[in-house]
Image (tube, coloured by chain):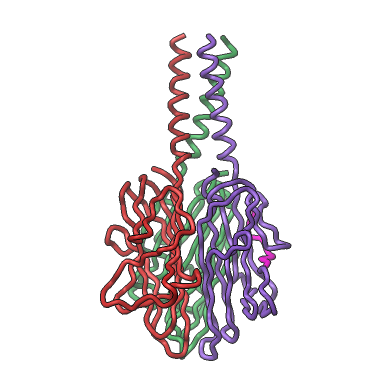
Chain colours: A red, B purple, C green
Amino acid sequence: MACLEDRLKACEEKIADLMGKEKTMVAFSALAEYGGAHGPFDGDTTLVYNTLIANVGDAYNTSTGVFAAPVAGVYCFILSYHAGGHQIAKLTLTKNGEPIVATSDHKSDADTADNGGNAAVLELKRGDQVYVRLAAGAHVWAGNQHTSFSGFLINQM
Amino acid sequence: MACLEDRLKACEEKIADLMGKEKTMVAFSALAEYGGAHGPFDGDTTLVYNTLIANVGDAYNTSTGVFAAPVAGVYCFILSYHAGGHQIAKLTLTKNGEPIVATSDHKSDADTADNGGNAAVLELKRGDQVYVRLAAGAHVWAGNQHTSFSGFLINQM
Amino acid sequence: MACLEDRLKACEEKIADLMGKEKTMVAFSALAEYGGAHGPFDGDTTLVYNTLIANVGDAYNTSTGVFAAPVAGVYCFILSYHAGGHQIAKLTLTKNGEPIVATSDHKSDADTADNGGNAAVLELKRGDQVYVRLAAGAHVWAGNQHTSFSGFLINQM
């Protein structure tokens, strides 16, 4: 009897583990909505995407623009922007202060609108912070649902 | 004995539940292929991405351009476009008639080609519809595998 | 007793199967970093994204630029590029020699910088190869973390 009971107990523990991992959902999307052009500013600033599309797991903060990983794992992040052409545009996906991927455009009188974006897969520890920095002197178009930041947990570790 | 049997039955039910969720795969990618410039049209229209790259779960319809969520869950959508510069370009990812994220470019004689895209994470109920609207007066380049729409289930709810 | 033991054995096997699938993590991100403009070259070449951001599962090769699927499944790939405007830009996501999605821009004196990207969901067999081709005569900006290639396993099959 002990043998069967031990095996059953092991099964129960593994199932609880699998169900716990399966329940961990982390996924967000947010827009920068400030009624139009946002920037340029004197220094580098964190772009606060202030309008939520989704925030499953509540890991993205619309007041600070910072995503903090609630569990260790592999995450994917995607950013897209629109900007007028009369100023530079430059956004950098940043992890704990370290630049990961960037997207930018030159100033141009001839081309009145710019689009850009980038994406990255990141291994994060619990508490790691991921956000987007807007470079000094750069602007983006923060209106009409054009400039967004999304992320989601691919696999818990 | 009843006790062991009850525990075993509970295990079996949880495993069936886990395996069912694990089997639910929803992921598609499609291209708009109309041999070149597509649009402009007088009114807003749904952009029908008519050429499949993948359609696991068969939730995207190549005749209507509409993705219908087969299960409640968290999904990710990504769209990318190319367009000539001599007309405006504007695409809006739309959920049940509600605009979610957009990407656009101005008309320009100087810049002869435009690229853009956007992405969003969405919480969907079963049956929710997601598609891309091409704005009145806008065009995209629907050729050479440049203009695409993809989506996939991140987590079933 | 045989009955309970058989059922328990079936549970153990299914749990092992679920845990095996759950442990299969495949996700990478890499940058093309060659100190600035990369190309144009006479013929089509594979763009070697030579600088890793992440390589969970070790399926992307930074020497060849080739991702080889370690397990059959549904994968997502995303590419983003920046380029100067004085040459054409053209990248094609390619699976075993077959073009899947492309992103490009014209040569332009007026627009000094171009951005573009594309994404696709692909069903892959074990060993299928996915990579990005840079077209003959095209260039990209391979510097400052602007030009990236990412992919991850959505579901194992």
Using residue A130 as the reference point, say whether residue B141 is left or right of it: right
Residue B51 painted magenta:
yes
Q: Where, quadrant-wise, is the C terminus of chain C in this rendering?
A: top right
Figure check: A54 above or below B49? above
Q: What residue appears at the point 56 percent right and 50 percent down from the top-left corner? A: B153
Q: Position of residue A127 (x, y in %)?
A: 31, 49
In terms of image quadrants, where is residue C140?
A: bottom left
Residue C28 seen in the current view? yes
Using residue C61 as the reference point, say whether residue C101 is left or right of it: right
In the displayed image of the protein, which residue is found farthest to the right?
B63
Q: What residue appears at the point 36 percent right and 51 percent down from the top-left corner? A: A123
Residue A135 painted magenta:
no
Figure check: B12 above or below B140? above
Q: What residue appears at the point 50 percent right and 69 percent down from the top-left corner? A: A145
Q: Position of residue C97 (x, y in %)?
A: 58, 63
Residue C48 seen in the current view? no
Q: Which residues are magenta?
A: B48-55
In depth, the one of B115 and B133 nearer the eye is B133
Magenta span dominant secondary structure: strand
Using residue C17 as the reference point, say whether residue C36 is left or right of it: left
Q: Position of residue C8 (x, y in %)?
A: 53, 19
Figure check: C82 above or below A3? below
Q: Where, quadrant-wise, is the N terminus of chain C in this rendering?
A: top right
In depth, the one of A153 and A57 nearer the eye is A57
